[in-house]
Image (tube, rainbow, N blue to C red):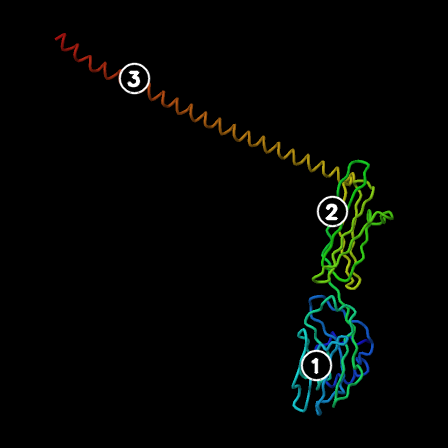
Amino acid sequence: MRCFLCLAMPLALCRPGLLLSFITVCSCLDPDCVLGIVGRPVFLPCLHPNISASVNVSIEWRRGDEVVLRSDWGEDGQWDRRSTDSAAISADAALTGNLSLLLPSVDPKEDNTYFRLFILSEGNQSAAVCTVCLSTAASFSPPVLEREEAAKGEEIAFWCHSTGGFPEPAIYWLINDTEKPPEGSVRTLTTSLPDSNLYNITSHLTVNISKDSSVSCMIENQSMNQNLTSTSYGVKRAPLNKRASDAMWIFSTALCVVVGIMVAVGVVYQIHLDRTSKRKKKEFRKHQLSKAYDRHQNGEETEVMKPASIETDV
């Protein structure tokens, strides 16, 4: 068991009763590295229960020769603390013995940097009580894979690009999921961003393959156990049963469209017939009414003329 296991323990759990069982376990003399993610806080573990607040005592966390944090204790507890980059330790560290250092943000420049804790009592400096190595890492963006089509018989070019990771990754190419590209067909450029020290990576593959081949680009970040893959698929022949299924689907769709058109035409034609029939019936009734009106008018004229003729005869 190494001291970096203390990272999983909240500070509240590191009480004196538990500390006694970790005196030999977390002495942190083993310089195994603690992994810190760039831009996130990290704990550098250190347990030393022998520190006492009954006399004046000071501790210093150093990064190389630089003092990252200094804290002084006396009979009244912690009375002075000075730190850079807002580094901190627990306020009751002298009582609990939990002298773990909290860094609020990890910088990629701190990769493989050693932090050491020293105790100063009555002017005497002890040897390093804890030595912790910090390694840093950051996730790369998912790779963007671009394929440049070429004329028949010419080589095809592929570009793979990923950004913002740390440390420098490894890049792999695969053809049809299993084949490695020919030697000399890959050119890779890795650049470090000056403001953040993070890496951008661009890889170029030029290969003579069929257009139905697939090509994959994989970015591997071993520090974070991270593998990111992007694949470009060519034009592949569909299996026979898939082609048959597609043909049946197309036929069914076309049949539905034809039937739909026929139904629509039938409905429109029926509406036209109904309108024509209604118009003819309306015209017929109008004609009948007109004839009836004419007969009625002729009948009245006859009745009016008859009395006049009778009076003349008399």
Q: CA distance from mark 3 to mark 1?
A: 127 Å
Image location of residue 62, percent across then percent down: 75, 77
Which residue is found at the position 53% from the left and 31% from the top? 267
The local crowd at label 1, few if under 14, some if 14 to 19, many if 20 or more residues have their Cα within 10 Å, is many
User: Mark 1 sits on what residue?
Assistant: 70
Image location of residue 162, percent across then percent down: 73, 54
Task: For the N terminus, give its image quadrant.
Answer: bottom right
Where disc 2 sits, the SS reads strand
Residue situated in front as seen by the camera: 211 or 163: 163
The quadrant in which residue 34 appears is bottom right
Mark 2 vs mark 3: in front? 2
Which amino acid lies under the numbered mark 3 shown in the image of this protein?
Arg
Which amino acid lies under the numbered mark 2 shown in the image of this protein?
Glu
Q: CA distance from mark 1 to mark 2?
A: 52 Å
User: Mark 2 sits on what residue?
Assistant: 146
The local crowd at label 3, few if under 14, some if 14 to 19, many if 20 or more residues have their Cα within 10 Å, is few
